Image (cartoon, rainbow, N blue to C red):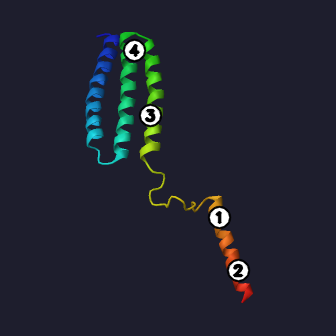
Amino acid sequence: MSIENAYRILFLTALIWFSFLLLITLIRAIIGPRVTDRILSINMICTMVIACTCILAYLLNESYLFDVALLYAMISFITVLILSATYIPKNPTRSKFAPDRGSAAAAAAEGAAEAAKGEKGAEK
C-alpha cells in the first residue's frame, strides 16, 4: 500500500464521516427548539460543506473547487450575520427606549438625576 492510497482512504473516510455528521446536524436544525440552535446548526453545516469541498478538490485534483469553497465561506459568513441580526435580539430583557447601564448616556442621566436630588436637598 502506497502513501497515496493511504491518503485516499483517509480522505474518503473523512467524507463519509462528514456526510453522516451533516445528516445529524440537519436533523438538529429541523428539530432545534430555539432559533439560535438552528442558526448554529446552519453555520456548522456550511463549515462541513466547505471542508468536504476542499477534500474533493484535493481528491479530484481540481483547483477551482478551492475557489468555490472560499466563495461559499464568504456567503456562509454573511448569511449567519444576517440571520443573527434578524432573529436574535440584542438584549431581550431591556426596554426598547431605556439607555444601557454602561453607556455614556446612562451615566449622564444618572449624574443629572443625582444633581437634581442635591439641589432639592440644598433648597430645604
Residue for badge 1: 107
Residue located farthest toward the bottom when viewing the structure as drawn: 124
N-term mark: 2 or 1: 1
The residue sitting at 48% across, 55% down in the picture is 91
N-term mark: 3 or 4: 4
Using the image, determine if residue 80 lies above or below residue 55.
below
Q: Disc number at residue 118?
A: 2
N-term mark: 2 or 4: 4
The residue sitting at 70% across, 80% down in the picture is 118
Which class describes the residues within 10 Å of circle 1: few (<14), some (14-19), or many (20+)? some
Mark 3 secondary-structure assignment: helix
Left or right: 61 as drawn, with respect to 16: right
Q: Amino acid at mark 1?
A: Ala
Mark 2 secondary-structure assignment: helix
Q: Amino acid at mark 3?
A: Thr
Left or right: 17 as drawn, with respect to 55: left
Q: Disc number at residue 58?
A: 4
N-term mark: 2 or 3: 3
What is the distance, in whole Å, between disc 2 and disc 4 at their CAs? Answer: 73 Å
Q: Nearer the viewer, mark 3 or mark 4?
A: 3
